[in-house]
Image (cartoon, coloured by chain):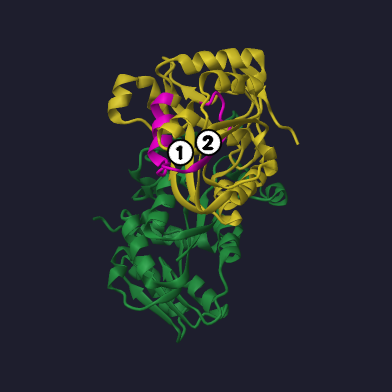
Chain colours: A green, B yellow
Amino acid sequence: MAKQNIYDNEAFFAEYMKLREREVNANNLFELPTLFSLLPDLEGKRILDLGCGTGERCIDYIKRGASQVTGVDISEKMLAVARSENSHPNITYLEMPMEDIGAIDGEFDVVISSLAFHYVEDFQGVVKNVYRLLCDGGVLLFSQEHPLTTCYSGAGDRWTRDENGKKLHANIADYCIEGRKDSTWFVEGVQRYHRMFSTIVNTLADTGLKILKMEEPYPTVELVQKYPEYYDLYHKPDFLFVKALK
Amino acid sequence: MAKQNIYDNEAFFAEYMKLREREVNANNLFELPTLFSLLPDLEGKRILDLGCGTGERCIDYIKRGASQVTGVDISEKMLAVARSENSHPNITYLEMPMEDIGAIDGEFDVVISSLAFHYVEDFQGVVKNVYRLLCDGGVLLFSQEHPLTTCYSGAGDRWTRDENGKKLHANIADYCIEGRKDSTWFVEGVQRYHRMFSTIVNTLADTGLKILKMEEPYPTVELVQKYPEYYDLYHKPDFLFVKALK
C-alpha cells in the first residue's frame, strides 16, 4: 500500500514552508482556531499527534499542560525542523508513516491529527490503531480536507467564475467515487484519498468511537469583509473536523 | 414558526401521487431499499413514523412484526389515503405537524422518518422530542434530502451540462448558508430547510444520540447501465440516511 511522503519532495517542502510563513492563510484563519476550540483539557494528558510535521502543535500541547507528546510524521525533512525548532524534554518525535502506528506501544489520552488523514489510503486501519492506542474515555480529534475538496481529481477547474473571475459555485463531480484522487498542490501528483461523509462517519462508528462533534469551518461576516477572497468557503468548505470518544 | 403543509396543496398532491405510481423512481430504486436495509429488527416493537404520508411504510412495519405503529403526518389528504388504503388494527394515524409531537405520550422502540425532516425548520426540537419518546436502547432511523441537494434555493440551474444535455457536474453554492431554501417541485415555493452535515451530526450528538450508521445511496454499476440517467447521483446524492441509538 502506497504511503505518500510528499513533504520530503524538495519543491513541495520549499513551497509549503513559504505558505506556512504567510501571516494570513486558511490554516491560521480557520483550521487552527477550530482545532484549538475542539481540544479537550490537555492538563496532564498523554498526546499522540499523527502527522505532526514541524512540531508546532506538539509545543502548543505542552504549553496547554500535556504531560507527554508523541509526534509521528513520515517526513524526515519536517521532523528535522521539528527537532531543531520545537524540541522539548516531554516531546518524542517518531519518523514513521501513520499507517505503521501498529508498532507503537503505550496508551494515550488524546490522539490528534491535523490535515493528514486525507493522505492515508487505509483510513480504517489507522482508526483501528487509534482506537487500540486510546485509553477508555480517550478522545480522537482530527481535521482533514473537506470531502467536497477531496472529491476533486486532476487539473479540471474546481470553480465556475463570472467574467471578473469571481467564484460563482463549486463544480462538484464524482463525490460518490472514493479512492485516490491526485491533485496539484505546489507540485503535480499529490496523492489524496477521497472518502464520503458516510464512510468517515461509519469507519469511526464501526470501530466503536462515538462522534461528539463535527465542524466544517467557514468565515464570519467580519472576516469576509476583511478578506473577501474567503467567501468561497461558504460555497465549499476546505476543512472537516471530527471529535470522537472511545 | 412555519409548519409547511405542501402535501395538502391540490396541484402538488396530484403530481406527487403520479410520481409515486411510476414503477421506476428514485424512491423505489434508492430510498426504499436503503431504508429497509437499515431497519432494526421490528418484531414486537412499537414504531413511530414521522411524516408517514399515505401509510405504505406503516403497513410494511406491521408486516415485519411491529406490535404497534403510530403514523404522524401534517397532511389531511395524505392521511385520508392512509386510512382508506393502509389501515390496520395496530396502526394509529395522527394528523399533526411533527413539530408538535411533544403532545404525544408513550414510549417507542423505533422512530422512523422517511424524507420528511428537510421540511422541518426546528430540527433540534424534533430530535429532542424523539429522544424523549424513545426507550433506552431505542433507535432513530431517518432519511432526508441530501445536504448537497437542500443547499439549493430558487430556480437557478443545479447542473452544468454539455451540449447534449448530459450533466457534467453539480453547481454547489452557499452550502454553508443554512436555513429555509425554497425550491420548485411540482409547484413553486416548496419550503425546505438546509442543514450542513455538521449541524445534523451535532444536533443528534448534542441530544445524546449515538450515530450508528450514515448512508448516501448511489447506484450500482448494473443499475446505471440500465438507467443511465441516474449516473448524476454519483456527482450529488439525493438522499442522506442516519441511524442513531439512544
Reply above or below: B9 against B139: above
**Residue lying farthest bottom?**
A89
Span of residues in magenta: B28-55
Q: Which residue is mark 1?
A: B66
Q: Residue at x 47, y 46 (%)?
A: B243
Which amino acid, mark 1? Answer: Ala
Instruction: Give the CA separation, mark 1 to mark 2.
Output: 7 Å
Q: Which residue is mark 2?
A: B69
Q: Tags 1 and 2 in contact by the CB under 8 Å rule?
A: yes
Q: Residues within 10 Å of mark 2 (few under 14, many from 20)?
A: many
Q: Tell whether position A50 is magenta.
A: no
Q: Residues within 10 Å of mark 1 (few under 14, many from 20)?
A: many
Which amino acid, mark 2? Answer: Val
Q: Chain of mark 2?
A: B
Q: How many labels sit on residues?
A: 2
Q: Is residue A217 visible?
A: no
Q: Secondary structure at mark 2?
A: strand
Position of the N terminus of chain B, as image quadrant, is top right
Q: Quadrant of residue B182?
A: top right
Q: Position of residue A184 (x, y in %)?
A: 39, 46
Q: Position of residue B144 (x, y in %)?
A: 53, 35
Q: Quadrant of residue A6?
A: bottom left
Q: Residue at x 38, y 66 (%)?
A: A131
Q: Position of residue B70 (x, y in %)?
A: 57, 35
Q: Chain of mark 1?
A: B
Q: Residue at x 58, y 45 (%)?
A: A233
Q: Is residue B116 visible?
A: yes
Q: Secondary structure at mark 1?
A: loop
